Image (cartoon, rainbow, N blue to C red):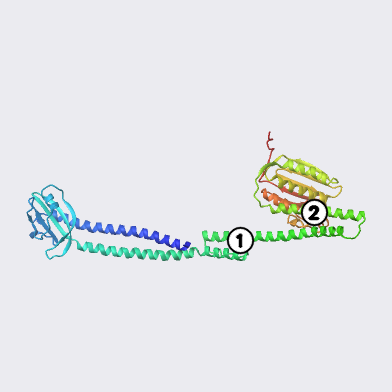
Amino acid sequence: MTLRARLTLVAAGVVAIVVALACATTYFVMRHELYSQVDTQLQQHAQDPSAVFPNFSPYTGDYVATVEPSGAADNPHHIPIDSQILAVAGGHALGFFRNRQVQTVQGSKVILRERVVPLSGGAVVVARNIDYIDHDLERLRFILILVSLGGILIAAAAGAIVSGATLAPVRRLTAAAEHIAETGDPSERVPEGGRGEMSQLGHAFNTMLGALEESLETQRRFVADASHELRTPLTSLQTNIDVLRGSVELDPEQRRRLLDDLHRESQEMRALIAGLLELARGGASLEKQEFQLDEVVEGAVERARTRFPAVSWHAGRLEPTIVDGYPDRMERAVWNMLENAGKWSGDGGSVEVTLDAGELRVRDHGPGFAEEDRPLVFDRFYRSAAARAMPGSGLGLAIVREVAEAHGGTVAAENANGGGALVRLSLNGSARPGSAPQSS
């Protein structure tokens, strides 16, 4: 059953219950009022002394009879006298009201409303034909049934119309989702007209489609860039291997240069694949843990001194800093920052590294960032014109940004005063001063 049908049934059901309760209340209130009017008049007639003498009663339309304890009765209208009336006449029971169907002398059946009141030495019975009340109540029942059915039908129709209008945005969302599932193209958008929850739902759906489209575009661009970047070292490796396997005799120097090229290309390939894996797992769910960022930075600086012995590495203030995050990924990000500074420093250059207030700063004294390159240095596979002559894949600083964002932080690249580049990694959200307790 569709949601629209269920909403229609719910609306009709609710209205049916409300209308049924209202009609039942109306019916019983009207019935009570009609009987109350008759009972009041019958009570008045029974208490009127003239009612004992029917020939002198001023009330027309009522039947009156007096009954003695012995059963003798002055009963010109032939009201049937039964044991209940005799019990009242004999003083054995109290007076009462009741409805009774009796047969007239003409043979027809009527419904009487009777009031039996005890009198001194007997009882008086005042009765009235209430067939008109029964007829009126029957008509009222018929009218209320028609009103109930009409209300239910109107409610069902209104429910179908309202649910159709209400669910129109949902149908559009469903159609858009089915179209996207068929075509694989999330560029379609749904109208966001209207107001309230449906408008918010449309906006949220379009936001989700935008994020999905951006994610797919990023994925396609990532695959295309990765394929392009991998093709160059693979081609170089294949060429050098073909030369080594060829029939041309190589002297020892040529052979050494080819092997050096193979080694260098394999190292670049390894670094490139490691970077790709790091970026690919950027959204993976990993368990966070506490670690000392200052110790990670100190270890990376020692590694950089070994990797770039011609560069002077100055580790200034390394404030003890605890980070809630991913130590392996942070270690790679810190190393990428230092490696980038080491490559651009050149022989005899120097690099200053500081860690203070949850911010890591790496400043070199190289050429700095060109103005046209600075906004792009954290993009994947981006390499400036000057960097293309140097080894690398263009993933180092992109990984730094990925890791910083995974820790709730930010990165920035700028030219330092006095020349050189300054790269800052800020971890305001996940870093705090202090040292983690040593486990025993």
Drawn side of residue 199 relative to residue 281, left or right: left
Q: Looking at this view, is 431 or 94 the one in front?
A: 94
Farthest top residue? Answer: 440
Which label number is shown at residue 268?
Answer: 2
Drawn side of residue 66 relative to residue 237, left or right: left
Please tell me whether mark 1 sits on a helix, a strand or a loop: helix
The amino acid on which the numbered mark 1 sits, given as a three-letter code, is Leu
Does residue 33 sit above or below 357 in this rendering? below
Q: x and y percent of residue 331 in the render?
A: 73, 46
N-terminal of the pair, mark 2 or mark 1, is 1
Farthest front residue? Answer: 247
Crowding at mark 2 (Cα within 10 Å: few <14, some 14-19, many 20+): some
Quadrant housing the C terminus:
top right
Res. 150 image quadrant:
bottom left
Q: Looking at this view, is 221 or 18 the one in front?
A: 221
Residue at the spot 30% in from the left edge and 65% down from the top edge = 143
Which label number is shown at residue 209?
Answer: 1
The amino acid on which the numbered mark 2 sits, given as a three-letter code, is Glu
Residue 213 visible, this angle = yes
Q: x and y percent of residue 123 in the render?
A: 11, 52
Drawn side of residue 317 relative to residue 137, left or right: right
Please tell me whether mark 2 sits on a helix, a strand or a loop: helix
Q: x and y percent of residue 422 in the render?
A: 77, 49
Crowding at mark 1 (Cα within 10 Å: few <14, some 14-19, many 20+): many
Residue at the spot 88% in from the left edge and 54% down from the top edge = 257
